[in-house]
Image: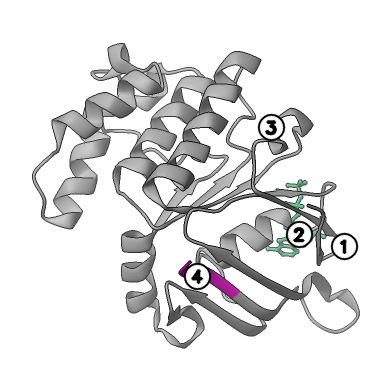
Protein backbone atom coordinates (compact mmCIF):
# COMPACT_ATOMS: atom_id res chain seq x y z
CA UNK A 1 0.00 0.00 0.00
CA UNK A 2 1.11 3.50 -0.78
CA UNK A 3 2.37 5.58 2.11
CA UNK A 4 0.45 8.84 2.46
CA UNK A 5 2.06 10.34 5.57
CA UNK A 6 5.61 9.66 6.70
CA UNK A 7 7.19 11.49 9.64
CA UNK A 8 10.86 11.03 10.41
CA UNK A 9 12.15 12.10 13.79
CA UNK A 10 9.91 15.14 14.00
CA UNK A 11 10.68 17.53 16.84
CA UNK A 12 8.69 20.64 17.65
CA UNK A 13 9.63 23.08 20.35
CA UNK A 14 8.18 26.44 21.33
CA UNK A 15 10.08 29.27 22.98
CA UNK A 16 13.78 29.42 23.77
CA UNK A 17 16.24 28.91 26.57
CA UNK A 18 14.81 28.02 29.96
CA UNK A 19 11.23 28.60 28.73
CA UNK A 20 11.58 26.19 25.78
CA UNK A 21 8.80 23.59 25.65
CA UNK A 22 9.15 20.40 23.59
CA UNK A 23 5.67 19.59 22.26
CA UNK A 24 6.95 16.72 20.04
CA UNK A 25 10.11 14.82 20.89
CA UNK A 26 11.12 12.80 17.83
CA UNK A 27 7.98 11.40 16.21
CA UNK A 28 8.18 8.55 13.68
CA UNK A 29 5.06 7.31 11.96
CA UNK A 30 3.94 6.02 8.61
CA UNK A 31 0.28 5.95 7.57
CA UNK A 32 -0.87 4.12 4.46
CA UNK A 33 -3.63 4.54 1.95
CA UNK A 34 -6.85 3.06 3.36
CA UNK A 35 -5.69 3.18 6.98
CA UNK A 36 -7.84 4.68 9.74
CA UNK A 37 -5.65 5.74 12.66
CA UNK A 38 -6.71 6.98 16.10
CA UNK A 39 -4.45 9.10 18.28
CA UNK A 40 -5.17 9.34 21.99
CA UNK A 41 -3.36 11.05 24.83
CA UNK A 42 -3.85 13.35 27.81
CA UNK A 43 -4.35 17.12 27.58
CA UNK A 44 -1.17 18.96 26.65
CA UNK A 45 0.58 15.79 25.40
CA UNK A 46 1.09 17.13 21.85
CA UNK A 47 -1.94 15.81 19.91
CA UNK A 48 -2.94 19.10 18.25
CA UNK A 49 0.68 19.92 17.49
CA UNK A 50 1.06 16.49 15.88
CA UNK A 51 -2.01 17.05 13.72
CA UNK A 52 -1.16 20.59 12.60
CA UNK A 53 2.41 19.56 11.78
CA UNK A 54 1.17 16.51 9.82
CA UNK A 55 -0.90 18.86 7.70
CA UNK A 56 1.80 21.49 7.26
CA UNK A 57 -0.04 24.18 9.24
CA UNK A 58 3.08 24.43 11.41
CA UNK A 59 6.67 23.56 10.51
CA UNK A 60 8.75 21.22 12.66
CA UNK A 61 11.83 22.42 14.52
CA UNK A 62 13.65 19.42 13.02
CA UNK A 63 12.82 16.20 11.18
CA UNK A 64 10.94 15.60 7.93
CA UNK A 65 7.35 15.10 6.80
CA UNK A 66 6.31 13.50 3.53
CA UNK A 67 2.81 13.73 2.13
CA UNK A 68 2.11 11.39 -0.76
CA UNK A 69 5.84 11.05 -1.40
CA UNK A 70 6.50 14.77 -1.39
CA UNK A 71 8.75 16.27 1.26
CA UNK A 72 6.64 18.96 2.90
CA UNK A 73 9.56 20.39 4.84
CA UNK A 74 11.45 21.50 1.71
CA UNK A 75 8.60 23.51 0.24
CA UNK A 76 8.07 27.23 0.49
CA UNK A 77 4.83 28.57 2.00
CA UNK A 78 3.09 28.91 -1.36
CA UNK A 79 3.94 25.38 -2.48
CA UNK A 80 3.02 24.06 0.92
CA UNK A 81 -0.41 25.66 0.87
CA UNK A 82 -1.03 24.29 -2.64
CA UNK A 83 -0.13 20.76 -1.52
CA UNK A 84 -2.19 21.21 1.62
CA UNK A 85 -5.28 22.24 -0.28
CA UNK A 86 -4.98 19.43 -2.81
CA UNK A 87 -4.06 16.55 -0.54
CA UNK A 88 -5.37 17.27 2.95
CA UNK A 89 -8.83 17.51 4.45
CA UNK A 90 -8.77 19.24 7.82
CA UNK A 91 -11.52 18.75 10.35
CA UNK A 92 -10.42 21.06 13.12
CA UNK A 93 -12.13 21.95 16.38
CA UNK A 94 -12.83 25.54 15.44
CA UNK A 95 -14.73 24.28 12.43
CA UNK A 96 -13.20 27.02 10.22
CA UNK A 97 -16.24 27.55 8.01
CA UNK A 98 -16.36 30.88 6.20
CA UNK A 99 -18.87 32.96 8.25
CA UNK A 100 -20.36 34.95 5.35
CA UNK A 101 -21.01 31.93 3.10
CA UNK A 102 -24.11 29.72 3.27
CA UNK A 103 -23.60 25.98 3.69
CA UNK A 104 -24.13 25.52 -0.05
CA UNK A 105 -21.59 28.19 -0.88
CA UNK A 106 -18.95 26.59 1.34
CA UNK A 107 -18.87 23.74 -1.20
CA UNK A 108 -18.94 26.09 -4.17
CA UNK A 109 -15.89 27.85 -2.82
CA UNK A 110 -13.96 24.55 -2.83
CA UNK A 111 -14.91 24.15 -6.51
CA UNK A 112 -13.99 27.69 -7.35
CA UNK A 113 -10.52 27.24 -5.92
CA UNK A 114 -10.18 23.95 -7.83
CA UNK A 115 -11.63 25.43 -11.06
CA UNK A 116 -14.20 22.65 -11.09
CA UNK A 117 -17.94 22.43 -11.59
CA UNK A 118 -19.91 21.58 -8.47
CA UNK A 119 -20.68 17.89 -8.26
CA UNK A 120 -24.22 18.08 -6.86
CA UNK A 121 -24.49 14.31 -6.47
CA UNK A 122 -21.42 14.25 -4.19
CA UNK A 123 -22.61 17.28 -2.19
CA UNK A 124 -26.06 15.78 -1.72
CA UNK A 125 -24.71 12.40 -0.68
CA UNK A 126 -22.54 14.02 2.00
CA UNK A 127 -25.34 16.31 3.17
CA UNK A 128 -27.68 13.36 3.48
CA UNK A 129 -25.17 11.08 5.21
CA UNK A 130 -24.34 13.77 7.75
CA UNK A 131 -27.98 14.73 8.18
CA UNK A 132 -27.51 18.38 7.24
CA UNK A 133 -29.47 18.40 3.98
CA UNK A 134 -31.99 20.94 5.26
CA UNK A 135 -29.31 23.39 6.33
CA UNK A 136 -28.04 24.26 2.84
CA UNK A 137 -29.25 27.86 2.84
CA UNK A 138 -28.12 28.64 6.39
CA UNK A 139 -25.02 30.53 7.47
CA UNK A 140 -22.51 29.13 10.03
CA UNK A 141 -23.72 31.63 12.66
CA UNK A 142 -27.21 30.12 12.44
CA UNK A 143 -26.02 26.57 13.15
CA UNK A 144 -25.40 24.68 16.39
CA UNK A 145 -21.85 23.55 17.23
CA UNK A 146 -22.64 19.99 16.15
CA UNK A 147 -24.20 21.14 12.87
CA UNK A 148 -21.19 23.33 12.10
CA UNK A 149 -18.95 20.39 12.83
CA UNK A 150 -20.85 18.17 10.40
CA UNK A 151 -20.78 20.83 7.66
CA UNK A 152 -17.02 21.16 8.17
CA UNK A 153 -16.67 17.37 7.87
CA UNK A 154 -18.73 17.34 4.67
CA UNK A 155 -16.67 20.15 3.17
CA UNK A 156 -13.37 18.47 4.05
CA UNK A 157 -14.47 15.17 2.47
CA UNK A 158 -15.97 16.86 -0.60
CA UNK A 159 -12.53 18.08 -1.65
CA UNK A 160 -11.50 14.42 -2.01
CA UNK A 161 -8.21 14.65 -0.08
CA UNK A 162 -5.76 11.74 0.18
CA UNK A 163 -5.16 12.49 3.87
CA UNK A 164 -7.91 13.39 6.35
CA UNK A 165 -6.81 14.96 9.64
CA UNK A 166 -9.56 15.21 12.24
CA UNK A 167 -9.16 16.84 15.65
CA UNK A 168 -11.85 15.53 18.04
CA UNK A 169 -14.39 15.30 15.20
CA UNK A 170 -17.05 13.90 17.50
CA UNK A 171 -16.57 16.39 20.36
CA UNK A 172 -19.79 18.36 19.90
CA UNK A 173 -21.97 15.44 18.77
CA UNK A 174 -24.38 13.16 20.61
CA UNK A 175 -23.49 9.46 20.75
CA UNK A 176 -25.53 8.41 17.74
CA UNK A 177 -24.14 11.17 15.52
CA UNK A 178 -20.64 10.59 16.84
CA UNK A 179 -20.82 6.97 15.70
CA UNK A 180 -22.17 8.05 12.30
CA UNK A 181 -19.24 10.42 11.84
CA UNK A 182 -16.66 7.83 12.85
CA UNK A 183 -18.33 5.34 10.55
CA UNK A 184 -18.14 7.81 7.70
CA UNK A 185 -14.43 8.48 8.36
CA UNK A 186 -13.82 4.75 8.44
CA UNK A 187 -15.68 4.31 5.15
CA UNK A 188 -13.68 7.12 3.54
CA UNK A 189 -10.51 5.32 4.57
CA UNK A 190 -11.54 1.80 3.59
CA UNK A 191 -13.64 2.24 0.47
CA UNK A 192 -12.11 5.42 -0.91
CA UNK A 193 -8.56 4.50 0.05
CA UNK A 194 -7.78 7.59 2.07
CA UNK A 195 -5.42 7.79 5.00
CA UNK A 196 -7.38 9.08 7.98
CA UNK A 197 -6.01 10.25 11.31
CA UNK A 198 -8.38 11.08 14.14
CA UNK A 199 -7.34 12.64 17.43
CA UNK A 200 -9.87 11.69 20.09
CA UNK A 201 -10.27 11.21 23.80
CA UNK A 202 -13.46 9.25 23.26
CA UNK A 203 -12.69 5.63 24.08
CA UNK A 204 -15.92 4.42 22.40
CA UNK A 205 -14.68 5.72 19.05
CA UNK A 206 -11.20 4.25 18.86
CA UNK A 207 -12.27 0.64 18.49
CA UNK A 208 -13.37 1.49 14.94
CA UNK A 209 -9.83 2.29 13.84
CA UNK A 210 -7.19 0.07 12.24
CA UNK A 211 -4.38 1.29 14.47
CA UNK A 212 -4.19 3.21 17.72
CA UNK A 213 -1.33 5.41 18.88
CA UNK A 214 -0.90 7.18 22.20
CA UNK A 215 0.95 10.46 22.55
CA UNK A 216 2.44 11.04 25.94
CA UNK A 217 4.64 13.98 26.78
CA UNK A 218 5.52 14.56 23.11
CA UNK A 219 6.32 10.92 22.33
CA UNK A 220 4.30 8.54 20.18
CA UNK A 221 3.64 4.93 21.14
CA UNK A 222 1.78 2.31 19.10
CA UNK A 223 -0.97 0.71 21.20
CA UNK A 224 -2.69 -1.57 18.71
N1 LIG B 1 2.06 27.98 20.08
C1 LIG B 1 2.53 27.46 21.21
N2 LIG B 1 3.40 28.15 21.99
C2 LIG B 1 3.90 27.61 23.11
N3 LIG B 1 3.61 26.39 23.57
C3 LIG B 1 2.75 25.65 22.85
C4 LIG B 1 2.16 26.13 21.63
N4 LIG B 1 1.34 25.16 21.13
C5 LIG B 1 1.41 24.14 22.01
N5 LIG B 1 2.26 24.42 23.02
C6 LIG B 1 2.62 23.51 24.14
O1 LIG B 1 2.96 22.25 23.61
C7 LIG B 1 2.41 21.19 24.39
C8 LIG B 1 1.50 20.32 23.53
O2 LIG B 1 0.32 21.07 23.17
P1 LIG B 1 -0.86 20.49 22.26
O3 LIG B 1 -1.83 21.59 22.04
O4 LIG B 1 -0.27 19.85 21.08
O5 LIG B 1 -1.47 19.37 23.24
P2 LIG B 1 -2.84 18.52 23.09
O6 LIG B 1 -2.46 17.12 23.40
O7 LIG B 1 -3.47 18.80 21.79
O8 LIG B 1 -3.71 19.13 24.26
P3 LIG B 1 -5.34 19.22 24.41
O9 LIG B 1 -5.83 17.81 24.47
O10 LIG B 1 -5.50 19.91 25.72
O11 LIG B 1 -5.86 19.99 23.24
C9 LIG B 1 1.73 21.86 25.57
O12 LIG B 1 2.64 21.89 26.64
C10 LIG B 1 1.44 23.26 25.07
O13 LIG B 1 1.39 24.17 26.13
Of 173 and 121, nearer the camera is: 121
* Residue extent of the magenta highlight: 1-6
C-alpha separation, residue under disc 3 versus residue under disc 4: 24 Å
Q: Is mark 4 on a helix, strand or loop?
A: strand
Residue that label 3 marks: 205
Of callouts 1 and 2, the N-terminal one: 2
Residue 41 at x, y = what percent? 81, 49
Compared to residue 106, the image places residue 147 above or below, namely above
Residue that label 4 marks: 3
Residue that label 1 marks: 217
Eye-nearest disc, 2 or 4: 4
Q: Residue at x 79, y 81 (%)?
A: 16
Eye-nearest disc, 1 or 3: 3
Residue that label 2 marks: 46
C-alpha separation, residue under disc 1 versus residue under disc 3: 22 Å
**Cβ of disc 4 within 8 Å of ligand 1?**
no
Eye-nearest disc, 3 or 4: 4
In the shown orientation, is residue 45 left or right of residue 194?
right
Of callouts 3 and 4, the N-terminal one: 4
C-alpha separation, residue under disc 2 versus residue under disc 4: 23 Å
Amino acid sequence: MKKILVMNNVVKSFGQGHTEVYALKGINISVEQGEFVSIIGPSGSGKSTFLTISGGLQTPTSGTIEINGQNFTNLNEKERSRLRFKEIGFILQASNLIPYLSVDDQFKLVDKINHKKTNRADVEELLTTLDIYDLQKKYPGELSGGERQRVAIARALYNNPSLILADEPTASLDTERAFQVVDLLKKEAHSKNKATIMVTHDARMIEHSDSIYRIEDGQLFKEA
